[in-house]
Amino acid sequence: MRKIIFLFITTFSFAQSVTKTMNLLADTGQNTSYTATFGEDNDYSINMPSFTNNANGTIIDTVTGLMWQQADGSEMTIESAYTYADNLVLGGFSDWRLPTPRESFSILNHQNTNPALNTTYFTNTNAGYWWTNTYQTGDNTKVWVTNAGGGIGNKPKSETISAGGTSKFHARAVRDITTPAVISNHFTDNGNGTITDNLTQLIWQKTPNATAVTWENAITYAEGLSLASANDWRLPNIKELQSLNDESLSNPSVNQTFFGSIGVKNYWSSTTVQNQTLNAWFWNTEFGITTFGLKTTVNYVICVKGNPVNLAINSVDLKSKIKVFPNPFSSKITIENAVGNEYFKLYNEIGLEIFSGKNIEKKDFSDLLKGIYILEIKGETDSKIKLIKQ
């Protein structure tokens, strides 16, 4: 007899219109493992960075859909940076602008450092920082900037050489290839202890872990979390974590209507500092800077999961008699207690179908990326099982 699951969830949204300039949130690019504990940044490859060189001084980020200036506009004050971007004509386009903090952070690559960029596509100009279009809330002497080490923060605008300082703050312009959409609700409270970010389509734990823990324990906590009938939670990478930040707010720098328990704290990401492997990146919610600290220190945890469009993970049936092993798996998936007429579908975390058919045990998944997958089994009893590819 087929088991039918009815799921009733009350959702709440409030008027919070926001402009969506990026199609997807790009991955950090980190591809090295720094711990045997499963769940670090390297273990998940979602929306890996991808660029196209237009051979005219412009680069397209094929993940976000933004077009970037290949070589930045050199060192200048923030006032000059606004003028520079507004007057730039490049690649046949004149609608260039300074990026938002989130956009500027999106092209950083956390497998690289100094600069934390893919220098195959972006010219290394020895910049220390890159201007964004956003001043610190309540203080027009400070501006949000990304830095060559891979971070983002609010810095005094007087620190650049052209303003009498000693650091190189450069301008890199961006433009929209298509007209950005306006989303009426940035966040949705799903009524089950989770919040959906409608910009990134990520689902967040509404109430963070109340106890500060080390980085390794943060990973273990996230991987073991069961919330809202889902167990595919993980520790967010630093780009995902920073995407929650609202630079118009401070103390904390996040929407309190939806994240009322987040407080002014440090939150671990799953991302290691590439050239300082005893350190990991974290997000501080006083203003929203990203910085790093020793993995043995204690910070707080807020977990994240994907929002698959094609897969209702919330209806996972954990009572199935069918056993799937090994889990984690590396190449082959073995099925036990199957009747013989089952049909299998394997999805990745964002709902993309990887395999469909009856003979899943004959399939070699050696080339499959590491991460969380959901195996959907259609038969006398339908079920879904969480698998980890290592």
Image (cartoon, rainbow, N blue to C red):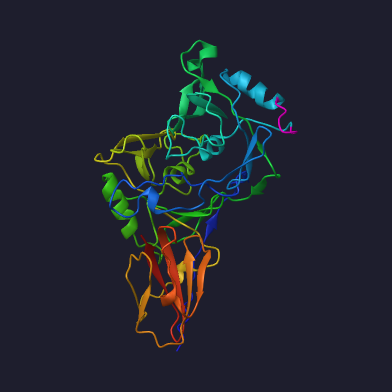
Magenta span? 88-93
Report the front residue among 258 and 212: 212
Asked whether the viewer can see residue 218, the reply is yes
Residue at the location (50% across, 17% down)? 160
Find the residue positioned furthest to the top.
164
The x, y position of residue 52, in whole percent, is: 62, 43
Percent position of residue 283, x then y = 39, 39
For the stretch drawn in magenta, the main secondary structure is loop
Q: How many marks?
A: 0
Q: Is residue 92 magenta?
A: yes
Front residue of 6/179: it is 179
Is residue 111 positioned above or below 390 on the image?
A: above
| Residue 233 lies within the magenta run | no
* Residue at the image position 64 percent from the left and 24 percent from the top: 82
For residue 131, above or below residue 354:
above
Q: Quadrant of the C terminus?
A: bottom left
Q: Position of residue 338 (x, y in %)?
A: 38, 84
Percent coordinates x, y for residue 355 in the rendering: 50, 70
Q: Quadrant where the N terminus lies?
A: bottom left
Q: Residue furthest left?
A: 296
The front one of 137 and 85 is 85
Locate residue 119 relative to residue 290 in the image: left or right.
Answer: right
Instruction: Look at the image and tell me whether residue 138 can be seen.
Output: no
In the image, residue 127 above or below residue 349: above
Q: Tell me: residue 220, above or below residue 149.
A: below
